[in-house]
Amino acid sequence: MSSLAPRSDFPILLAHPGLRYLDSAATSQKPRAVLDAISAYYSEDNANPHRGAYELSVRATERYHAARERVARFCGVADADCLIFTRGTTEAINLVASAWGRANIRSGDEVIVTGMEHHANFVPWQQIAFEQDARFRICELTPDGRIDLDELRAMLGRHTRVVAFNHVSNALGTINPVREIAAIVRERSDALIVCDGAQGAPHIPVAFDSLDVDFYAFSGHKMCGPMGIGALIGRRGTLETMPPYQTGGDMIEFVLDYRTTWNVLPHKFEAGTPNVGDAVGLAAAADYLDGLGMDAVRAHELALVKLATTALGDVDGIHIYGPPPEDRSGVISFTLSDIHPHDLATILDGDGVCIRAGHHCAQPLMRRLGVAATARASFYIYNDEADIEALLGALHRARGLFGYAGV
Amino acid sequence: MSSLAPRSDFPILLAHPGLRYLDSAATSQKPRAVLDAISAYYSEDNANPHRGAYELSVRATERYHAARERVARFCGVADADCLIFTRGTTEAINLVASAWGRANIRSGDEVIVTGMEHHANFVPWQQIAFEQDARFRICELTPDGRIDLDELRAMLGRHTRVVAFNHVSNALGTINPVREIAAIVRERSDALIVCDGAQGAPHIPVAFDSLDVDFYAFSGHKMCGPMGIGALIGRRGTLETMPPYQTGGDMIEFVLDYRTTWNVLPHKFEAGTPNVGDAVGLAAAADYLDGLGMDAVRAHELALVKLATTALGDVDGIHIYGPPPEDRSGVISFTLSDIHPHDLATILDGDGVCIRAGHHCAQPLMRRLGVAATARASFYIYNDEADIEALLGALHRARGLFGYAGV
Amino acid sequence: MPESDSPGTSLATLYQEMILDHYRRPRNRAPLPDASITVERNNPLCGDLIQLSLAFDGEIVRAAVWRGQGCSISSASASMMTQAIAGRTFGHARTIAARFGAMLSGDRAAADDELLGDLRALSAVARYPMRIKCALLPWSALEEGMLGKRGVGDGG
Amino acid sequence: MPESDSPGTSLATLYQEMILDHYRRPRNRAPLPDASITVERNNPLCGDLIQLSLAFDGEIVRAAVWRGQGCSISSASASMMTQAIAGRTFGHARTIAARFGAMLSGDRAAADDELLGDLRALSAVARYPMRIKCALLPWSALEEGMLGKRGVGDGG
Ligand SMILES: Cc1ncc(COP(=O)(O)O)c(C=O)c1O
Ligand SMILES: Cc1ncc(COP(=O)(O)O)c(C=O)c1O
C-alpha cells in the first residue's frame, strides 16, 4: 500500500528521507502548495485587510474573504460568515465556553463532557462550570473506549446547559456518532452542543450544516495547514445573540466613550488584525485535501489502521486501546509489556519512527484507562505500508532491548 | 534620502515596482528572510513542540524556545519566560484585561485609559470596567495631541487600579514618555501599568526591563514579522499570581476530574498548540531589525517624517495632527481642505501611493479631534524620499481634481 | 497601485463635477419631522455614516432626506438617490436601486440607462472596488426602509 | 530520526542491564514515615511524576526514598540517586548532583568520575536531549528538598 498523497509533495519528507512520521494527530506535515501560498500572499498581496482604501488592501481583504469561503466550503458551511477564524481548536472552544458560557450558564445548570476529551474540550468547561456555579459532569466510557450513550441519556435533562464532546478522540481514535449523539441530546434537553472537531475535519468528510451541533471547532495545523489558524463554526442565531469574546479593532461598530456596539458576523468575533497569511495557507490546505478527496483520505487511513492493528496485534505483550479499527480514525494507541511509552518512543526514534508517548493531553482518559501514558501512532495521507513495517520492526527491536525473547 | 533597508529585500516591492507603501502602521511588509525562515521551519523541523519524544519534536521545541529567547532579547527582557506569545497586541491586552482584570478589578475601582488609544487598548478596559462595576475614565489630551499629564496626575489615586496607554499613537504618531508616565502613576497609586507597544516595538528601541511598566504588548506583523503572532511581556510576580486566560493543552500541570492545576511560565498562558512557524518568523524579523539597528530605524523614520512634515506643510489647505515631528514616530496624520480622506486615498492609490484613511481604530480620538476621519501616511525602513515626493505629487493632483488652484 | 491606463482620466471621471457638486451642495440634507421611518447605516471600517429618513404616502415615497458624514462618493450617492426616489412608487424606487446596483457591478447597459438620470455620474465607481461600498451605503438604508413595502407594479 | 551511527549500539548503552534492573526492581521505593521533607516533581508534558522523601540527621541525609511513575530513565535515576545520597552529607549530595548534571550535559570527565558510581550507567542519556529531563526529574526534587541546607565542606 502506497501513500495517498505523493510523499514528494511534502518538503520535510524529502529533507529527511528516513523519516517515518507517525504523529500527525499531534500536527500534520505541510505540502509545498501550502507553504508557497503563504509566501505568495506576503510577496504579492500583503496589507492590513478591511482597513485600507487602496487596491493592495482590497486585494488582501479579498484574499482573506476567499479563504473563509474556501474553508467554509471544505467543511460544509453554506453561510461563510458563521465561520470564525481562530488560532485553533483550543481558542475556538475557549471562545464558546467564555463568551457563550458566561452569558448563559447559571447556577444549578449542568455542563457535560465525556471521559475521552482532550484537555482543550475539558478544562474550559470544567472552569466555566466552576465559575458559574454550575455542575460539571463527566459522561463515562464503555470498556472499548466509546462514549456510553446510555449513561449520557440518563444524565441529560432540563438542567443540562452544555454537552461537549469530540468528533474523534485524539488518544484512542474513536469516531463518535455525532448525529446520533446530537439527536439524543436534542430529545432530552435544550443544551448547547459543542463538537471538538480537531481530529474530525482533517480525517473525515465533515458537513457542518447537516451535523445538528451548535458549534464545531478545528485546527489548521492538523490538516496540512499552518499553525496559528483554525476555526469555530457556529449557527448564525447563536453567534448573533451571544456577546463577543475579545474586543478591539475590526470587531466594533461604534466605540463611544462609555459604550461600544459590535460589528456584524464574522467580524464581531475576530478582534484585531486578522491572520490573513495563515488563513490563505489553510485555504490552500483545503484545496489540497479536497484535491485528494476527503472520502479517499478516510479510506486510506482506515486501510492503514486496519493493517497496523492486525500487524501490531501479533506482537507479544501489546495492548491496543479503543474500539476496533473500523470505528477508529488513523490512530493506534497501545502499550507494550512493561516498556514505558517514553522508552518506546526513544527506541523507535532510533529507526526514524516518530510516535507520541504520554497522556496525549487527555489525563482524565488515562485515569480511566488505568495507565499513566500510552504510545500512539497516527497515520495521514503521506503514510504508507513501509511506515507500518518500520513501526513493527522497531517495536521488535524495543522488545529485544528490554530483554524479551523472539526477536 | 534612500531607504534604510534595501528595497530588494522585500519581495512585494519587487513584485510591484511602482508601489509607494505608506501604510506600515497598519501592517509592515516582510523581508524575504522572514518568509524563508517560516518555510524552512515547516520544511525541516516541523512537529508539535513540547509533546513528542522523538528528535524532530525536540527540534521543533528548541526552535520555539529559541524564538522566544530571540524576541525577548529584541525588546530587552532578561527573563524570557515572561514573554508570552499571543496572536498580537489585541489578544495580549484582552489577556490582561480578562485574566488579571477579572481577578483584581473590584467595584469602586477606577480604570484609566487615554483619549488617544487604539480600540484594542480602549474597548477591553471599557468592557471589563463595566463588567466589574468599576469606573472607566479617559485621560484627555493636550491640543497638540499628547497625553495631558496634569490631568493624569489629578485622576490618579488610591482607587486607580489600572492605567493603560500606548507607547506610540497609531493615529497621531505621538511618542509618549513611558518612563515619565510610569513614575507619575507609581507615585500616586498602586495601579497596574499596561503599555500598548504595537507602534513602539517596531519603530523605537524598547528595553522592557527598564520601562517600569507591568505589561507591554506588541504585534509581529507590524515589525516585519508574519501575521498571527505577537507578544505580551509581563513581570514574573504578576504573571505567576494571576489566573490563566485560555485553558487547554500545554498550559496544565494536572487535570483532575473536578480541578486543574497550571503549568509554569510561559506555558500557563499559552493554551493549545503553539504557533511555532510564525514565532520563528518573528524571531527572523527581530534578527532583521537588529541587523539594521533599532537606533538606525528610529533615526530613519524621524528623518522621513521631518521631511514629509515640511513638504506637506506647504500644501494649501493641509492640516497636520499631533505634536511636532521630533515627538512623532514615522506617522503623519492629516486632512486636506474639504477632500474626504477616503477620496484622498483613492486618488493617491492612482499613483501607487498607499495611505490609510479612516478613524484608524481610534474613534474616541477622532471625536476629540473633531473629525470623522484623517488620512495617514506612515513610514518604515523601506521607505525613501521618492515615496514622499510621490505622496506630495499625488496630493497636488487630488487638489486639482477637487478644483483647487495652483497645480 | 498605479493604474494601468491613464489614472488621471479615470479619476477625473470618478470625481467629475456632478459628483463634487452633490458632495459640496448636498440635496435633501434636512430633517424630516414627519418621517415614516428613519434608517441608519454605517461602514464600521471607515466610519462613514448615513441616516436616511423616508415619508410614505400610500405606495409612494413622498419624501426622502438624509444626514450623515462620508466621502464624496457616499454623499453624492445619497444626495442623488433622494432626488431620484422622491415622489416615486416603491416599485419604481426598487427598479432604480436594482439598476444602480447593476451599474456598480459593471453592467454597461445599466450605466447607459436613462432611468438612472444623474446617478449615472457614479458609474466610474464600478472600477474602484473599495469604493463600491461607499456608493451603496445609502441604498442599503433605502432597502431596509422599504422592507416589506409592496409597490405598484411589483411582480411579487 | 534515524541515528547517524549505529543506533543499535547507542540504544543498547542507553538501555543497559543496570538501567533496566533499577527500572524493574527499584531501590528505596518505599514510604518514609519520619521524613523531614517530601517533594513532588512532575513533567506536565509527559505525565512523569516523582515523589521524593528525605530524612535528615544533622547535616546528613539519613534516608532517601521515592515513589511515582515514570519511564525507565527517570525511575532508574531516582532509584540510583537515593542509593547514592543516603547516609551522605548535604555537601556530598550536592557534589554528586553537580557531577551528574555535568555528565548529562556531555562532560566526558564527569562520565568517568568514580564518585558517580552506578549512576554512570546513565551517561548515554546525554545523547538523547529529549530524555535529559527524565533523568533530572528526581534530582530537581532533591535540590528543592535540600534547599537552604548547608553541608559540611560547603564552600558557601
Ligand atoms: C496602537 C495600536 N494598538 C493596538 C493595535 C492592534 O494590533 P493588532 O491588530 O495586531 O492586534 C494596533 C494596530 O492595529 C495599534 O496601532
Ligand atoms: C481532540 C483534540 N482537541 C483539541 C485539540 C487542541 O488543538 P490545538 O492545540 O490545535 O488548539 C487537539 C490537538 O491538540 C485534539 O486532538
Image (cartoon, coloured by chain):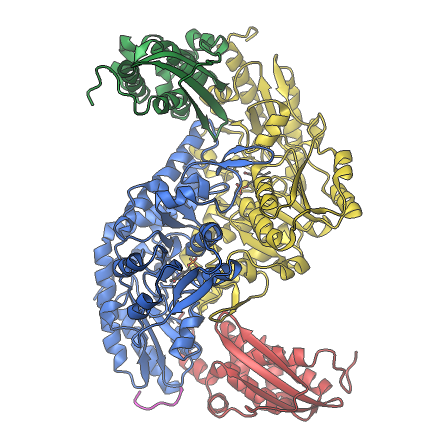
Chain colours: A yellow, B blue, C red, D green
Instruction: Report whether A175 appears left or right of B36.
Output: right
Q: Is residue B269 above or below residue D29?
A: below
In the image shown, does A195 or D43 lie closer to the viewer? Answer: D43
Q: Residue furthest left?
A: D155
Q: Percent position (x, y) of residue A254?
A: 51, 71
Q: Quadrant of the C terminus of chain C?
A: bottom right
Instruction: Give whichever of B124, C22 is nearer the camera.
Output: B124
Residue A192 % position (x, y)? 69, 49
- Asked whether residue D8 is in view, the answer is no
Dominant SS in magenta: loop
Residue C116 visible? The answer is yes
Residue at x 63%, y 30% (from the top left corner): A172
Judge whether residue C8 is colored magenta. no
Give ligand 1's quarter of the image: bottom left
Instruction: Find residue B153 and report its image quarter.
Output: bottom left
- Which quarter of the picture shows residue A220? top right
Task: Name the image quarter holding the N terminus of chain C.
Answer: bottom left
The residue at the point 72 percent across, 86 percent down is C90
- Front residue (pair B68, A32): B68
Q: Residue at image x 33%, y 91%?
A: B405
Residue closest to the eye, B256 or A56: B256
Task: Tell me the magenta residue range.
Answer: B402-407
The number of numbered discs placed on residues in the rendered structure image is 0
Tell me: residue B280, above or below residue B384. above
